[in-house]
Image (tube, rainbow, N blue to C red):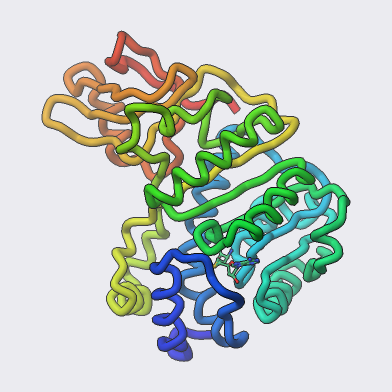
Amino acid sequence: MTWSELDWASLDAHREQFLGGKPCDGPYWSSEADLASYDLTYGERIGWKWDAVLDELRLRGWRPPAGPLLDWGCGSGVAGRRVVARFGAGTFESLSLWDHSPVAISFARGLAAAQFPGLAVSGATRGELSGSEPIGLLVVSHVLNELPPQALEELRGLVDRSRAVIWTEPGSREISRALGSLRDSWVGKFRVVAPCTHANACPILGPGNERHWCHHFAAPPSAIFADSNWMKFGRRAGIDLRSLPYSFVALDRDWDGESGLSRIIGRPEDFKPYVRLLNCDAGGLEYLSVMKRDSRPLCKELDRATGPLVYRWTRNGANITGASPPHR
Ligand SMILES: C[S@@+](CC[C@H](N)C(=O)[O-])C[C@H]1O[C@@H](n2cnc3c(N)ncnc32)[C@H](O)[C@@H]1O
């Protein structure tokens, strides 16, 4: 698929479907060409979110468990491919792909098999999904608002069989808070690797924090801003390509991470004398400030940061006086 071959009519229809945010009645992919158009555009943008998620997991020193990798609701398969590319095909016993659309499974399988010739890539069967075989890593991407209750239950059953889960979604309030509730239901069975730096109930879902939601911003590759195809796509699709909000949760049954870290929610805000940020850590959710007169380099770093906003603060009350990255 090249930019000149894009099927705009199908992209426009999918855009409507995704924006509608309603559970879907059934498969909507019509052909491999349909999936190829998605994979080059919307799918690639989702890939950039996965790059940010995987950067954060690397920062936290996480590695996937051995065993099979399952990409559920795979669409064109971008999530599974990004994960295999990051950790190496040798890390996984196999890559299994599932979608209620058979053409999606076939398309995703073809791309993954071509990219990772040494890896066993297959479409999952309904029998495998309803079985009890352990899953190493389950990846889920941008499906939550499409799922009727029964499909979500099916997916929860797969989470129960997994050693680790990475689930990435758009950064909208409603979806992020829904993912946060799922996260809370798994704390205890799993350790939370990221974005949380603690295993308490999600403070954003607690009383008084209704206006907040756990979301982050990925940075698209800078080259797209000089690429007329991406610019045209952005205009045509009516999206601001600079803004890539996402939410995610990564869980692992065996994770033993570093304590005492903080995660910034959303983007730090720049005010004249200080930078303000919404901080989440084991103590809960609160606004903290960094005074420019005391910590100008840190203010600059926070203003320009494009990577995961995870720090170990030195604080004086609600004032941050110093910062260091996780040890890894
Ligand atoms: C927005 S697309 C995301 C595709 C891919 N995961 C990604 O991140 O690019 C949602 C995908 O979920 C699939 N899906 C929706 N409901 C499903 C269900 N009940 N069971 C399996 N797959 C489902 C759709 O067919 C579609 O491929």
Q: Residue at point 51% right, 76% down? A: 38
Q: Residue at point 46% right, 88% down? A: 7
Q: Quadrant of the N terminus?
A: bottom right
Compared with 254, 242 (above or below) is below
Viewer-side residue, 145 vs 170 = 145
Dividing the picture into quadrants, the one containing residue 29 is bottom right
User: On the picture, is 89 further left or further right than 178?
Assistant: right
Dividing the picture into quadrants, the one containing residue 21 is bottom left
Q: Percent position (x, y) of residue 221?
A: 42, 59
User: On the picture, is 140 further left or further right than 46?
Assistant: right
Residue found at the far front of this picture: 149
Compared with 24, 6 (above or below) is below
User: On the picture, is 87 further left or further right than 240?
Assistant: right
Ligand 1 found in image quarter: bottom right
Residue found at the far bottom of this picture: 5
Viewer-side residue, 299 vs 148 = 148
Q: Residue at point 37% right, 67% down? A: 224
Q: Quadrant of the C terminus?
A: top right
Q: Residue at point 79% right, 47% down? A: 136
Compared with 182, 188 (above or below) is above
Q: Percent position (x, y) of residue 174?
A: 40, 50
Q: Percent position (x, y) of residue 158?
A: 74, 51
